[in-house]
Amino acid sequence: MDYPILFPIKDYEGRYSITKDGKIWSHINKGGWLKGHLAKGYRYYCLTKIDKTHSHKSAHRLVAQTFLPNTYNRPEVNHKNGIKDDNCFQNLEWVTAKQNSQHTYDVLGYISKRRKLSDSDVVYIRLNYIKGQGNGYRGNKHILCELFNVAGSVILNIVNRKTYKKPVNKLLYGKGR
């Protein structure tokens, strides 16, 4: 039988150890594997220090702190494959909040619930927007506003690529650029 290799958890040395895939062994009393609990898909463990204070720690963060150097001092840990309970160190990486958010869009295909327009709506707006020329001609911004039930500023931000930056590239060229 192969026994997993255990590594001490920082600030909990002598009390808990962790494997490279995020399982935690307690050295307290007779010892044993902690079950932890799931919250929003992530596995959490309740760890107790010698002074009896306890805190809930996510398995992925404990794995990253133990096995992955955080050279650029990035604040978040990302699951590369998007599976929140896959805490193997090869599946984790340190990222910024922006990188983590972009990963959910690029890799996992997540679209924000706050997002009102689809990618095809954005493409339609960009391809069909006609700027007003003065001389009494207003362009078609007001028509697009009515069609998509959005404000004029939304249309201008889309056309000027201040918002919805990736949809056109993704639809026209097959991926975000």
Image (cartoon, grey):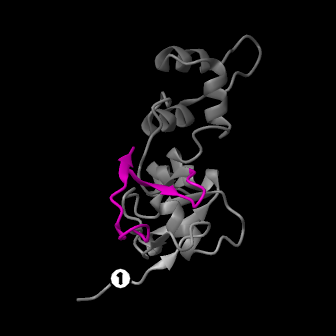
Q: Secondary structure at mark 1?
A: loop
Task: State left or right for residue 2 relative to residue 90.
Answer: left
- Residue closest to the far top: 136
Residue in the image at 56% along x and 59% along y: 49
Residue hosting label 1:
4
Residue 150 lies in the magenta stretch: no
Type of amino acid at the residue the image marks with label 1: Pro
- Residue closest to the far front: 29
Residue in the image at 48% along x and 37% along y: 112
Q: Nearer the viewer, residue 33 or 66?
A: 33
Q: Nearer the viewer, residue 108 or 117?
A: 108
Residue 152 position within the rendered picture, expressed as x and y whole percent measured from the top left: 64, 19
Which residues are the magenta region? 25-53
- Residue closest to the far left: 1
Residue 56 position within the rendered picture, expressed as x and y whole percent measured from the top left: 50, 50
Residue in the image at 40% along x and 63% along y: 81
User: In the picture, residue 3 is in which quadrant?
Assistant: bottom left
In the displayed structure, 122 sits above or below 11; it is: above
Q: Quadrant of the N terminus?
A: bottom left
In the displayed structure, 69 sits above or below 46; it is: below
Q: Nearer the viewer, residue 121 or 137?
A: 121
Residue 42 position within the rendered picture, expressed as x and y whole percent measured from the top left: 41, 52
Task: State left or right for residue 78 relative to residue 22.
Answer: right
- Does residue 166 appear in this view? yes
- Near mark 1 (Cα within 10 A), the count class, few <14, some 14-19 or many ≥20, is few
